[in-house]
């Protein structure tokens, strides 16, 4: 069995590759759905010696199957957002400590000690439903910040504005984590000139407003909050790790997470740096589910290791994605 603690101590690409290959072999042998997917491709997992050879499981499988690599009781089931009648992704989590370690160490990796921050959360669309992995994470960050003013705000935008201004003027380090439409609602009601506050958008208008391209959204938010840049979080129900952007929509991953770009016409071909294609994610925190996910996001990687999200494709023809559906 793989020592999960070691996954969060990875220091360089060679350590990542060794760990990822071990996780791949473990999941190829123990994850029934992933194994069936590999068999469908006539793929011999025992011959894999490099990450480039690994097939990525289409993310749609989380809507139709229980993606599990261990036979343990389920501690939590995270559900994707979706309109009524829409099939939701389900991430069955048998070890919440993997998730908790991943987001806490990820936060520390990018931002430092959680206890240095007051965490304010404006996530109404997530609070209004059950099973959100984002709410689970933010609620724990709020608790672990140990700051009296940390907390969630639903529709009380006036209270949030007062708290935000008062903390910022005191020189407190503040992080406001918000869904895009709610952050826009806030700056339409209040003007800010913040100096000590990080504004982090988690994406998505969730049907409440017209979708904006990231550059236009960030321009509006910068003006409204009086800040020079907007931070972003890139995560999803099917992953237990997050990537972060500290401005301009260029994301970095923690050491146990890696992005690659696949050809949208050939899911088993990888594209060079600078070319746009489908985003594949290796998330080693997904030790007990599947760590190798072909997402429905489009993006590109740059020479400095950052990546950008360019949009989504919803009718992706990923070879093998119809396997066992039904």
Image: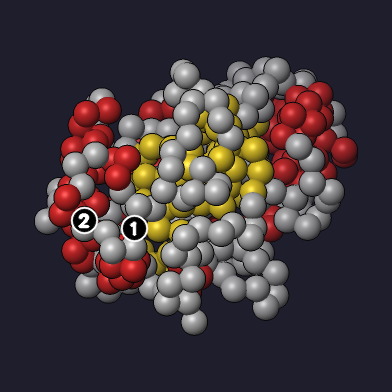
Q: Nearer the viewer, mark 1 or mark 2?
A: 2
Looking at the picture, tell me which residue is in the foreground, 112 or 216. Answer: 216
Q: Which residue is mark 2?
A: 45
Q: Which quadrant of the figure contains the N terminus?
A: bottom left
- Graded by Cα atoms within 10 Å as few (under 14), some (14 to 19) or many (20 or more), the crowding at tag 1 reads many
Let me know if residue 137 appears in the view: no
Position of residue 196 measured from the top left corner of the image (x, y, whole percent): 62, 20
Q: Position of residue 147 (x, y in %)?
A: 50, 37
Q: Which residue is mark 1?
A: 290
At x 38%, y 33%, the residue is: 254
Residue under the image location 78 percent in, 57 percent down? 207
- C-alpha separation, residue under disc 1 versus residue under disc 2: 15 Å
Tell me which residue sits at (30%, 45%) in the image: 53
Is 32 on the left-hand or right-hand side of 279?
left
Specify whether residue 41 is in view: yes
**Residue most extreme to the bottom:** 326
Q: Quadrant of residue 160?
A: top right
SS for dot 1: loop
Foreground: 318 or 18?
Answer: 318
Q: Position of residue 251 (x, y in %)?
A: 53, 30
Is 98 rendered above or below residue 127?
above
Percent across and percent down for residue 218 are 74, 30
Q: Is residue 164 above or below residue 313?
A: above
Question: Residue at the spot x=56%, y=52% of the render?
Answer: 296
Helix, strand or loop for disc 2: helix
| The image quarter in which residue 106 lies | top left
């Amino acid at each position: 069995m793989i020592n999960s603690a070691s996954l969060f101590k990875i220091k360089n690409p060679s350590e990542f590759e060794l760990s990822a290959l071990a996780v791949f072999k473990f999941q190829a042998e123990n994850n029934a759905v992933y194994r069936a997917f590999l068999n469908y491709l006539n793929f011999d997992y025992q011959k894999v010696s490099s990450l480039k050879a690994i097939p990525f499981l289409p993310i749609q499988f989380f809507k139709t199957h229980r993606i599990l690599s261990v036979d343990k009781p389920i501690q939590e089931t995270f559900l994707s957002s979706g309109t009524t009648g829409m099939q939701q992704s389900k991430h069955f989590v048998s070890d919440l400590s993997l998730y908790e370690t991943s987001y806490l160490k990820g936060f520390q990796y990018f931002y430092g000690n959680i206890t240095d921050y007051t965490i304010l959360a404006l996530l109404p669309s997530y609070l209004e439903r059950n099973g959100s992995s984002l709410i689970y994470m933010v609620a724990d960050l709020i608790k672990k910040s140990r700051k009296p003013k940390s907390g969630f705000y639903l529709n009380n935008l006036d209270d949030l504005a007062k708290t935000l201004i008062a903390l910022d003027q005191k020189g407190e380090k503040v992080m406001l984590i918000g869904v895009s439409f709610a952050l826009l609602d806030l700056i339409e009601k209040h003007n800010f000139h913040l100096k000590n506050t990080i504004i982090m958008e988690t994406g998505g208008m969730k049907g409440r407003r017209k979708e904006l391209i990231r550059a236009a959204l960030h321009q509006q938010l910068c003006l409204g909050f009086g800040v020079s840049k907007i931070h972003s979080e890139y995560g999803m129900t099917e992953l237990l790790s997050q990537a972060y952007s500290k401005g301009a929509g260029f994301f970095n991953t923690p050491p146990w997470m890696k992005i690659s770009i696949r050809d949208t016409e050939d899911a088993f071909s990888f594209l060079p740096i600078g070319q746009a294609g489908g985003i594949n994610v290796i998330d080693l925190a997904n030790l007990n589910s599947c760590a190798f996910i072909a997402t429905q996001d489009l993006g590109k990687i740059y020479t400095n290791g950052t990546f950008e999200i360019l949009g989504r494709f919803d009718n992706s023809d990923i070879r093998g994605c119809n396997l066992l559906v039904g």
